Image: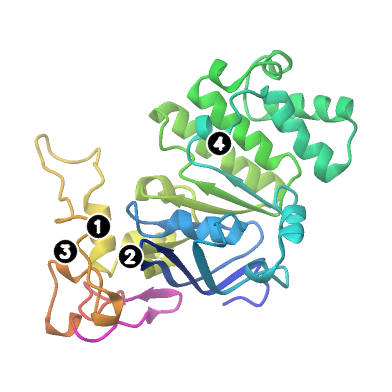
Amino acid sequence: MSAMSLLRVEELTVTFRGGGREVRAVDGVSFDVNAGEVVGLVGESGCGKSVTSLALMGLLPRKAATIGGRAEFDGMDLLSADDRTLRDIRGREIAMIFQDPLSSLNPVVPIGLQVTEVLVRHRGQSKEEARRKAAELLDRVGIPDPTRRLKEYPHQLSGGMRQRALIAMAVACRPRLLIADEPTTALDVTIQAQILELLKELVREDGTALIMITHDLGVVAGLCDSINVLYSGRVVETAGRYPLFDDPTHPYTLGLLGSIPRLDAAPGERLTPIRGSVRDILPWREGCAFAPRCDRVVDGCVGVTPELRSTVAGHLHRCVNPSEVPA
C-alpha cells in the first residue's frame, strides 16, 4: 500500500440486519486510491460494489447496517466521522455519480437549481454566480444550449443528458475523489463512449482520483489504472490493468473475461458464460464462495477460507487452484 494514498480502505465490512437475520454484503474489502488514479471495482450485481461506495459516502442507513473497518481519506476515517462532517465533505471533497440519473435527480426541481445548490452550499457563491458557473459546467460536460437546460426538469432531458447533468453536479466543486457507480449502464454504446471519455478528461485535467464501479470489464479496459475484482463481498483478484487482462489468475476473472463479446471472434462463436447464478455461493468461512460455480474446483477449495496471496508484485488472487500464474 502506498504511503501517499488519498484514500485507503482497510478491511471494510457491511452487515445488514432485517427479518431476524444478518447478511454480510461487504466482507473485508481493502484497496488504495492515489490522487489522479483510476481504480476499478468490478463484479456481477450483488458482489458488494455499490454497497462499498455507499458506505464510503456515509449513505447507508445506520439502523439497518453495521459498518466495520477503516476508510482513511486524507488522514480522516470516513467510517467514524459524524453526519455534519460528512455533509461538509460530500460534494466538496468527495462526490458520487449515481447509477440511475432519473431516480437520482429530483423530478420536481429544475436542473439548474440542483447544480447551483452544490455551489451555494460548499463554495459560498451567490445564486447569480452559481447560475453562471452551472451553465459553464453543463457546457463543459457537453450539454447543448446550457442556459436553456438550466430551466428544464429531468424528464425533459435524454438519458445521456441526465447522466451528464449528474456529472456536472459531481464535479462542480472540483472534488479530490469521484466515485462513479455504473455511470454508463442505461446508455447506448455511443453515449457510453462519450461519458467515459468525459471522465478520463476530468481525471486528466483536474487530477481527480476516480473509483469506477462496473460489471463490465470492457469499460474498465480503457479507463482504469488498477482493478479489484469482487465476488460475494470480497476481493478475489487485484492487479494493474495490463497484468489483469494479460494474465488473469482467478477463475471468476476468467469467467468475466470469457463473457465479453469479441470483435475478432469467428462468426457464430458462442460466449462462455459463468454457470449458475450469484446466489450459488458458499459462505467464506466454509471455503471459497465461488466454488459452486467454478470449473477448477478441487478438494482444497472447501473447508478452508482462501487468503489473498501474491503471485508477482501488485498482482493478488484469492484462489487455491488458479490458472497459470504469471511469470
Up-down relation of residue 132 to residue 70 (above or below): above
- In the picture of the structure, the residue carrying the numbered disc 3 is 293
- Per the model, the C-alpha gap separating discs 4 and 1 is 26 Å
| Quarter of the figure with the C terminus | bottom left
Q: Give, as a three-letter code, the residue at label 4.
A: Ser
Picture disc at residue 232: 2
Judging depth in this view, the residue of 321 and 280 nearest the camera is 280
Q: Is residue 169 left or right of residue 64?
A: right
Query: Around disc 4, counting alpha carbons within 10 Å, would you say few (fewer than 14), some (14 to 19), or many (20 or more)?
Result: some
Q: Report the magenta residues as a range.
A: 303-318
- Per the model, the C-alpha gap separating discs 3 and 4 is 34 Å
Percent coordinates x, y for residue 175 in the rendering: 71, 50
Q: At 45% from the left edge and 47% from the top edge, which residue is drawn?
A: 222
- In the picture of the structure, the residue carrying the numbered disc 4 is 104
- Per the model, the C-alpha gap separating discs 4 and 2 is 26 Å
Mark 3 or mark 1: which comes first in sequence? 1
Q: In this view, does 192 lie to the left or right of 43?
A: right
